[in-house]
């Protein structure tokens, strides 16, 4: 299975990069992982709705260039469906059984995802009603993908 994580911005904090590297290494046993970083836009303090829409649209265009027609696209969105770790594992497993060989997970920038990306998504996934820093979200997402593969393999990781 090919898994892509597409997100705006570079991860600057060393501790987050270390965690991303660790989970990427662990996942290499189970899937082919590709992390795609697209340029992010600076969001001015107290930006108007119009400015925020423009920022999301620019980031959305950059993200859209990496989305593949044959991929199953999962957008991380606060209004998406919340799944347990077991349900995420089952979703990944079911996609593979149905012949899906490419999953792309999209994380939005600091103000979220453009509506065009949300419409393109095959599934909207929410990790919580809370908002997380988008750079930290990469680590959380990688950990949950790794946990899903461990669950699906029947390996001792999940309690």
Image (cartoon, rainbow, N blue to C red):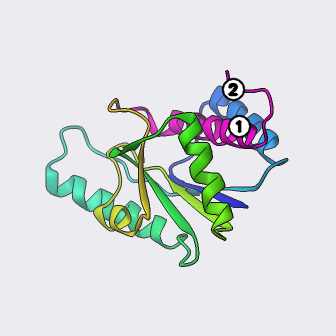
Residue at the spot x=66%, y=57% of the render? 3
Task: Return the residue found at the far top.
Answer: 159
Q: Position of residue 36 (x, y in %)?
A: 61, 58
Q: Residue at x 66, y 41 (%)?
A: 148
Image spot of residue 8 (x, y percent): 49, 52
Whole-angstrom CA distance, mark 2 to mark 1, is 6 Å
Q: Is residue 135 highlighted in magenta?
A: yes
Q: Position of residue 64 (x, y in %)?
A: 46, 70
146 in magenta? yes
Query: Which residue is identified by label 2?
Result: 158
Instruction: Give whichever of 5, 126 is nearer the camera.
Output: 126
Residue 4 vs residue 37, the one in the foreground: 4
Which residue is label 1 attached to? 151
Q: Tell me where the magenta segment starts and ends, as one range.
A: 131-159
Q: Secondary structure at mark 1?
A: helix
Q: Relative to 25, is 96 on the left or the right? A: left
């Amino acid at each position: 299975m090919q898994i892509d994580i597409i997100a705006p911005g570079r991860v600057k904090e060393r501790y987050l990069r270390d965690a991303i590297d660790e989970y990427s290494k662990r996942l290499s046993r189970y899937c082919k992982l590709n992390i795609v970083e697209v340029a992010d836009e600076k969001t001015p303090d107290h930006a108007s709705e119009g400015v925020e829409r423009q920022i999301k649209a620019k980031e959305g265009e950059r993200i859209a260039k990496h989305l593949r027609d044959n991929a199953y696209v999962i957008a991380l969105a606060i209004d998406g469906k919340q799944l347990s770790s077991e349900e995420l594992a089952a979703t990944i497993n079911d996609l593979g059984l149905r012949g899906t060989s490419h999953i792309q997970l999209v994380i939005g920038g600091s103000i979220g995802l453009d509506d065009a990306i949300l419409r393109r998504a095959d599934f909207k996934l929410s990790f919580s009603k809370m908002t997380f820093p988008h750079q930290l979200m990469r680590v959380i997402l990688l950990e949950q993908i790794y946990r899903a593969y461990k669950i699906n393999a029947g390996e001792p990781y999940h309690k």
